[in-house]
Image (tube, coloured by chain):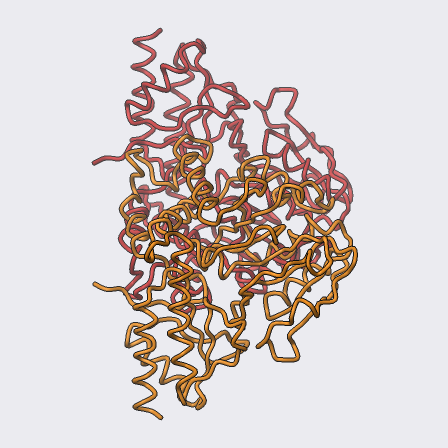
Chain colours: A orange, B red
Amino acid sequence: MARPFNFSAGPAAMPSEVLQQAADEMLDWHGSGMSVMEMSHRGKEFGEIMESAQGDLRELLAIPENFHILFMQGGGLAENAIVPLNLSRGGPVDFVVTGSWSQKSIKEAARYAKATLAASNANSNHTTLPAPGSWQLSADAHYVHICSNETIHGIEFHELPDLKALGSNAPLVIDFSSHVASRTVDWSRVGLAFGGAQKNLGPAGLTLVVVRDDLLGHALPACPSAFDYKTVAANGSMYNTPPTFSIYMAGLTFQWLKRQTEGALSGVAAMEQRNIAKASLLYDFIDDSALYVNKVALDCRSRMNVPFFLRDEALNDAFLAGAKAAGLLQLKGHKSVGGMRASIYNAMPLEGVQALVNYMRDFEKTRA
Amino acid sequence: MARPFNFSAGPAAMPSEVLQQAADEMLDWHGSGMSVMEMSHRGKEFGEIMESAQGDLRELLAIPENFHILFMQGGGLAENAIVPLNLSRGGPVDFVVTGSWSQKSIKEAARYAKATLAASNANSNHTTLPAPGSWQLSADAHYVHICSNETIHGIEFHELPDLKALGSNAPLVIDFSSHVASRTVDWSRVGLAFGGAQKNLGPAGLTLVVVRDDLLGHALPACPSAFDYKTVAANGSMYNTPPTFSIYMAGLTFQWLKRQTEGALSGVAAMEQRNIAKASLLYDFIDDSALYVNKVALDCRSRMNVPFFLRDEALNDAFLAGAKAAGLLQLKGHKSVGGMRASIYNAMPLEGVQALVNYMRDFEKTRA
């Protein structure tokens, strides 16, 4: 039976192939007689799973050798503290606030460092991106933080800022939770990237940190050992027991990503093309319709999270009930902005977006 | 096909019924059209899973209403920092060090508070428990920490200390990672209990904290918001996205525990009887044998983790190879103590321990 299309913002849809493989291997991984959940993290079997996952991710995202791949716990909200605990040295750090997530980040960082607002899009109600040339960067910032895709407001940096070109030597920190692995990353512009796995990589409870080697070893005394990047890196993400099954699921997702192709492209490059096609299909339909509206500026619309509103909000409940009946799940917008949100991560096929557009068109015809 | 018996110290064996149910529901939980991994943690479906898990655990462990059940991340090693960040107020805290885990705990706590060694069993090489009457408790300690079951050294508190009877008003903190849900808990003697899930509750990546209400709200300024017990409690363990699938697996394990019976007993009480029988079978055999030896004092031998040695260590490799061939997995001892270790958590049936004893007897006969 075909599964419904699941537009959850996270934890989010996963590829059916990946879920099926996990179900098939649940009681016996590769003839080991054990579920992956039952393996010592120090054993040969899990060692293979860990090594494959890290190697595949490095290949998929073209992560240079001078970056460490860390599998941690606590999600983006914990990293909002863990990043300044590791990188700020208590000194000045700059934030570009473009929505709910970067707002949370600066608030938490201010507990550990002098956190300065370098730029904000509050005056547009989080529907634009402030041009990097306008950012007020501190001369001595220990890092500059952006949320490269704001899940709630549906805003995405389609090009990472080049801090060097802006006259800053600070490393760029990106919270890429909700668009990691949906597009290529220019690592020459990044010092550290972090993200919860539960949008595009795997189950909630796994946190990915990709950090440049020279940024390790500067943790504040208050940093818990289990969250000191240097300690985590030195122990191959096994200082504390890692979330082994979540790493396994992420690894299966990486293998699935490697198998994806679009024409001559494969892996993340193929996925990026597919994501562009999916997002264009949905945004074009919304822009052409009389009932639906997306308020985000054209140059920074997220390919992953598409918030939209019905011009007649009295129709919201009927829209959601009809969507569910049509096998289109979890479309309700975040409570802080209202309306609807379609999260169309890697695991959402083009057919799912097409089904959503078809439903939206039919709904508009019958109700408007 | 029967599965092998898995003696891993953690991540550890899980009940086959639980794994089978997870496999069956992997692509569609209760007709929702979603895997549990794919559900918004804010949605109705996961809300039901969370509520059942917490309710079942409260019932199983008879947790009083003035204790909060928190589902967190980071494992016991992260809690080694999170507990003093929340409870120490920077002041004196007492530790009873009885093995590797309490040793790690005092070391990490010393980074946040004045951590005092109240008692130690180092003089017996971690094979005894210092009598509570001999503990040197600080008059003004903000808590007293014990590891109620030392996974590596195989030492267990069979009765929790009564700090009030020792003249102390400090709350008792127990690290019960490796024996949680294997026996009843006298909550009148406990202020806070914590444990990683990966021994007796579910997959790695979930951390259980049970904390008395009056201990919330005293976090140090350096405590990350995501690890402030008050914040976690106020948000129903959903301040940050919880490890949803791990909570679901723990919930299935709790349901399995509730179904267990021994005579008129059920749940944890039944499990405790079964665990006593399992441990007795193994220890009695070891004590009667000429080849195997367990060095822990009789009054504090762990029911969960049974470290043992072959008197002829040259036989170690052959012992392990034969065990694996006989379907007895992950028996190698921790690298810090060597030898063997059989972890016989709740999910290990009596038949598994009997199979181990049979193998050990046969091995001794042919090799000794």
Give coordinates of residue A257: x percent, y percent.
Answer: 37, 52
Does the rendering let one see residue B226?
yes
Which residue lies at the image location 65% right of the left edge and 23% below the top edge? B122
Q: Nearer the viewer, residue B62 or B26?
A: B26
For the point 57% across and 51% down, the residue is A187
Locate the N terminus of chain B by quadrant: top left
Q: Is residue B349 above or below residue A320?
A: above
User: What residue appears at the point 23 percent right and 35 percent down from the top-left corner?
Assistant: B2
| Number of numbered tags placed on the structure image | 0
On the image, the x and y values in percent for residue A162 come to 64, 58
Q: Is residue A367 left or right of residue B221?
A: left
Q: Is residue A60 left or right of residue A174?
A: left
Q: Is residue B58 visible?
A: no
A351 vs A90, left or right, is: left
Eyeballing the image, is A64 above or below B255?
above
Relative height, residue A75 to residue B116 (above, below): below
Q: What x and y, as percent, mark residue B261?
A: 32, 45
Q: Quadrant of the C terminus of chain B?
A: top left
Which one is nearer the viewer's eye here, B172 or B1?
Answer: B1
Q: Is residue A19 left or right of residue A143?
A: left
Q: Residue furthest top?
A: B368
x and y percentages locating residue B105 in the rendered image: 64, 37
